[in-house]
Amino acid sequence: MRLRSFSLGLTTPLATARGDITEREGFLVGVGAEDGDETPDPGLGEAAPLPGWTESRSACESALREERDDDGSLIDGALDRLEPSETPAARHGIALALADAEAREEDRSLAARLAGEHGLATPAETVPVNATVGDGDPETTAAAAERAVDEGFDCVKVKVGARPLDADVDRLRAVREAVGDGVALRADANGAWDRATAREAIGRLAPLDLAYVEQPLPAADLAGAAALRGARDGRDDRAGDDSPVPIALDESLASHGVDAVLDAGAADTVVLKPMALGGPDRALAAAATARAAGVEPVITTTIDAVVARTAAVHVAAAVPGVAPCGLATASLLADDLAPDPCPVSDGTVPIPNGPGLAGDAFDGLP
């Protein structure tokens, strides 16, 4: 197993309620013939930890190195030993590398392999994506949203929670006025609000016809999210006086797990990050579980580099009729590890050509 560290700066710091994100660090993970007969073709993965969503960089590196034998090969059973709740980024890197190698050996795309494992239909050829707009004053936020719509996006997600609620309501109102009613508008608070603020926000934002408010409460407050949504204990269906704005959960999945979120009736949508969930296999399994429970899955990245970002596109393509996903994040990076095999065009991304992740597009990276 080959490891290569990387560090990529962002074009502009992305302001969130958790603070500014300025760079992405991680490891490329390569497996090949030296790792055993079951993975004879080269496979590539990415482990890009993001504290707050995953383990630390040092914990990720330690976990990866512990799975490498003295001769440099991957130790058998690594995926069974790596705990997704403790070192999800490390597991993602190895799981993706193995899946890429196996899909290439089978001469089919990673999306097709994932879909086949879960009994899903033939993957889509393109995936709809949303644009993400960071913090800023109302004019700046609205202008960024307008540019996204001009570029072909019909879904825009605005980061909120870094400012007082009054300011965020003004920002979202400015965006809605700028882009009109035909564009889906999402707000992502990254867990910044307390219960009282979240309840007030839901009421004030209802007239703006938001697709959903993402992670309005801290990740640990699953009961608060269920109460905000209007769910009733012991019921799987939604109550008649539920939230006027749908609720999406993201960080809560890492804190509680998908099953607990679904059992609590706490979300209309679950935002699934393969890097934070421990791999593309676990992300697609979570999507299937959510869909079966009547909750919509959305696939996003943690502002990953091109390898993990491409893998997330494959996961999204395997979800039938997936809603716009948070995969248009390449432009947030000042540089990348390789040319993007699935660039955004008119608000969609294509599935790359070739077997595995992208044929031979990433050969030689690790």
Image: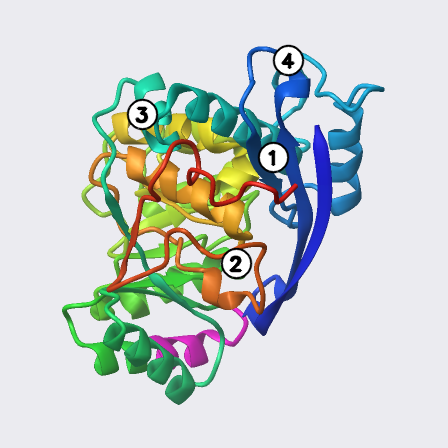
Q: Disc 4 versus disc 2: distance between alpha carbons?
A: 51 Å
- Residue 222 among magenta residues: no
Badge 1 amino acid:
Gly
Choose between 269 and 197: the one closer to the eye: 269
Q: Disc 1 versus disc 4: distance between alpha carbons?
A: 18 Å
Report which residue position mark 3 lands on.
Answer: 115
Mark 3 or mark 2: name the one nearer the start of the chain: 3
Residue drawn at x 59%, y 41% is 46
Provide the residue span drawn in magenta: 161-172
**Local crowd at mark 2 within 10 Å, few (<14), some, or many (≥20)?**
few
Residue drawn at x 38%, y 89% is 139
The image's mark for residue 93 is 1
Mark 1 or mark 4: name the one nearer the start of the chain: 4
Label 2 with label 1: CB-CB less than 8 Å: no
Mark 2 or mark 1: name the one nearer the start of the chain: 1
Choose between 181 and 194: the one closer to the eye: 181
Q: Disc 3 versus disc 1: distance between alpha carbons?
A: 19 Å
Q: Disc 2 versus disc 1: distance between alpha carbons?
A: 34 Å
Report which residue position mark 2 lands on.
Answer: 194
Badge 4 amino acid:
Gly
SS state under label 3: helix
Q: Is residue 50 above or below residue 328?
A: above
The image's mark for residue 36 is 4
Q: Residue 38, position in %: x, y?
A: 55, 12
Badge 3 amino acid:
Ala
Tell me the mark number nearer the camera, choosing from 3 and 2.
3
The image's mark for residue 65 is none
Residue drawn at x 30%, y 43% is 268
Q: Disc 3 versus disc 4: distance between alpha carbons?
A: 25 Å
Badge 2 amino acid:
Asp
Mark 3 or mark 1: name the one nearer the start of the chain: 1
